[in-house]
Amino acid sequence: MKFILASQNQHKLVEMQNILSAHGVEVVLQSELGLHVEVEETGATFAENAMLKAKAVMAASGLPAIADDSGVCVDALNGAPGVYSARYGGPELDDVGRYRLLLENMRGARDRTAHFTSAIACAFPNGDTIEAEGICPGMIAYAPQGDGGFGYDPVFFLPQLRKTYAQLTPEEKAAVSHRGKALEVFDQKLREYLKGK
Ligand code: IMP
């Protein structure tokens, strides 16, 4: 089974391929098919945005499409950056600029609790859809640590492992991460769906 990933994000692609390939599911970037569908993330939730992206790419390609919408929600910031994680601080910031801004906005905050959410949506040309969600609780570190991963990984600290996401191997991250958990649920739902076909 082959899905078009409704994203340009190589890191997401690799994480999704690593997890789903074990179950015979192939994921390819839309650019590999010459597609460049840009979807405005107008949804109020991760799930809405994921479905918007999956449906747009499915409509443009005529093939099953899969999307992940994800972000970090920080309790001391009333859930920010949340669905705005990719746009936090405006378009001129890169990943490092965004996590530095987050650390800046958390300066003096004693409550460092946060969680990452990943919403996975897939849309089939016959109109069927599958949705799944995964959450990983953690804390915002006081300073970045580690150089693996992407995005906010260097500042997302997992107390039980005493490491940030950026200090984990891809396998270790997949075992605990929001995306790993969402993909596990997705994989179960996909199997059920395909059984009924
Ligand atoms: P979107 O889902 O493409 O709207 O963007 C999600 C944003 O959340 C990314 O640009 C990252 O900044 C952040 N994000 C999502 N997943 C992760 C992750 O696994 N590690 C670190 N940052 C992430």
Image: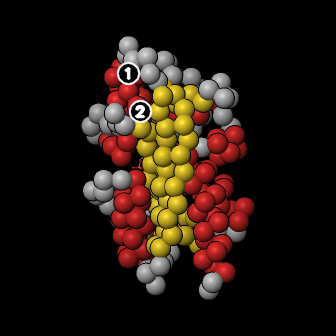
**Quadrant in which residue 31 is drawn:** bottom left
Going by the image, does 38 lie left or right of 154?
left
**Quadrant in which residue 56 is drawn:** bottom left
Distance from mark 2 CB to nearest ligand 1 atom below 8 Å: no
Tell me where residue 55 appears, x and y as whole percent.
39, 71
Q: Earlier in the sequence, mark 2 or mark 1?
A: 2
Quick one: quadrant of the C terminus?
A: bottom right
**Local crowd at mark 2 within 10 Å, few (<14), some, or many (≥20)?**
many
Q: Relative to residue 135, is residue 111 depicted above or below?
A: above
User: Mark 1 and mark 2 in contact (Cβ < 8 Å)?
Assistant: yes
Q: Relative to residue 134, is residue 145 depicted above or below?
A: above
Tell me where residue 21 appears, x and y as whole percent.
68, 62
Determine the quadrant in which ligand 1 lies: top left
Q: Relative to residue 18, is residue 24 depicted above or below?
A: below
- Residue type (three-letter) at the residue carrying disc 1: Met
Going by the image, does 165 lie left or right of 49?
right
**Quadrant in which residue 76 is drawn:** top left
What is the spatial separation of the Cα atoms under label 2 and label 1, in whole angstroms? 9 Å
- Residue type (three-letter) at the residue carrying disc 2: Val
Q: Relative to residue 146, is residue 42 depicted above or below?
A: below
Residue displayed at 36% across by 46% down: 83
Between 172 and 176, the one lying in front of the other is 176
Tell me where residue 97 appears, x and y as whole percent.
37, 29
Residue labelled with disc 2: 74
Residue displayed at 55% across by 64% down: 28
> How many numbered marks have been drawn onto this rendered protein structure?
2
Q: Which mark is residue 80?
A: none
Res 82 seen here: yes
Going by the image, does 31 lie left or right of 149?
left
Extreme residue toward the right, this view: 22
Q: Secondary structure at mark 2?
A: strand
Residue labelled with disc 1: 106
